[in-house]
Image: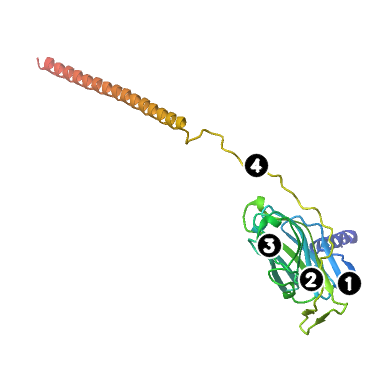
Amino acid sequence: MRHPIVILIVVLGCALVVAKGEPGPHPYHEYQDEVLGTCREYVQTNAHWNHSTLWVSESFPRDRTFVSMNVTSPRVGGVKLVLRRREGEELQQIRLKSFGHGGKGKNFEETTFVDDAEEHFPMWPEEAPFTGNYAPDVALSKIEGSSRGKWTLMAIARAKKQSQTPQIKGWSVTFCEDTIGDGLVTAQGAVIVNPMEPLTKPVVDLPAPQTWPAYQKSVYRGPNLLDKNTYVNFWTEAAGMVRDVTRNWNEANFYVQQVKTMQKKAYAARKDFEEAVHAHKDG
């Protein structure tokens, strides 16, 4: 019979492995907003790579959804942002930002995507670092269902260089239920919003974005190839090299001919010697 203490240790070890494999749900901060209604904000500050996940165990209405982030990237135009929700076997995802937008601008700082934003993500890098509310490429309302599920933010890099891989420093997703009565909900769950003041994003305390030092471009400090003296010196040196190579080749050819002459003389002397030996024997 096995010892009960050993069995207990094995059971506790298995339970620990299972617990580590499935991270628990993230806590949320609930608050009331005069325009948005009742909102629940889930924040992930433990992000450190180009994708990060939040686990939401509660089913909360999603009349409005906000996605805020701090992402470091040396070239925002080379980054595509994707939001994914998985619940069970069902997987849905939308594109928040496409490649190209943002150009050579650096970093997303307090960047928020919300369907009601008046502007899309800028095309040009002059507005970097990119801060404010932007409408996503695909509406957040296209993701059906409640807040429950596994939410993942992905920052996909176009370039394969490790130095250009974006880093998610922190992000949050906020779900708001229209409890104020300023909007009407259709049977399909879509929100019809009456005209109101522009929405403001929820305040999210995220880590400061990473910065990169500015490197000065290398400057060519060699000779000016278009300068007259440089041009003359180049051809003078080239002519000298050709002259030296020709002289060396002539000398080598002279020694080769000398060796050939010596070989011929040795062959003739040997032949004369052999003939003299045969003549002596024939006597």
Quarter of the view holding residue 34: bottom right
Q: Residue 106: x, y in percent?
A: 70, 54
Residue 136 location in percent, x, y?
A: 71, 68
Which mark is nearer the camera, 2 or 3?
A: 3
| Mark drawn on residue 216 | 4
CA distance separating discs 2 and 1: 16 Å
Amino acid type assigned to the residue bearing label 3 in the image: Pro
Neighbor class of circle 4 (other Cα within 10 Å; few <14, some 14-19, many 20+) is: few
Check the image and report above or below for 277 versus 99.
above
Disc 2 marks which amino acid? Thr
Horizontally, residue 271 falls left or right of residue 26, namely: left
Residue 175: numbered disc: none
Element carrying mark 3? loop
Residue at mark 1 to residue at mark 3: CA–CA distance: 29 Å
Q: Which residue is mark 1?
A: 34
Camera-side mark, 2 or 1: 1
In three-dimensional space, the C-alpha distance between marks 4 and 1, rounded to whole angstroms, equals 50 Å
- Amino acid type of the residue that numbered disc 4 sits on in the rendered structure: Gln
Badge 1 amino acid: Glu
Q: Secondary structure at mark 2?
A: strand
Q: Earlier in the sequence, mark 1 or mark 3?
A: 1
Q: Are the residues tagged 4 and 1 within 8 Å (C-beta)? A: no
Q: Residues within 10 Å of mark 2 (few under 14, many from 20)?
A: many
- Mark sitting on residue 65: 2
Mark closest to the chain's N terminus, 4 or 3: 3
Residue, disc 3 = 122
Q: Is residue 270 left or right of residue 86?
A: left
Looking at the image, the residue that sits furthest to the bottom is: 187
* Rendered-image quadrant of the N terminus: bottom right
Asked whether 93 or 109 is in front, the reply is: 109
N-term-proximal mark, 2 vs 1: 1
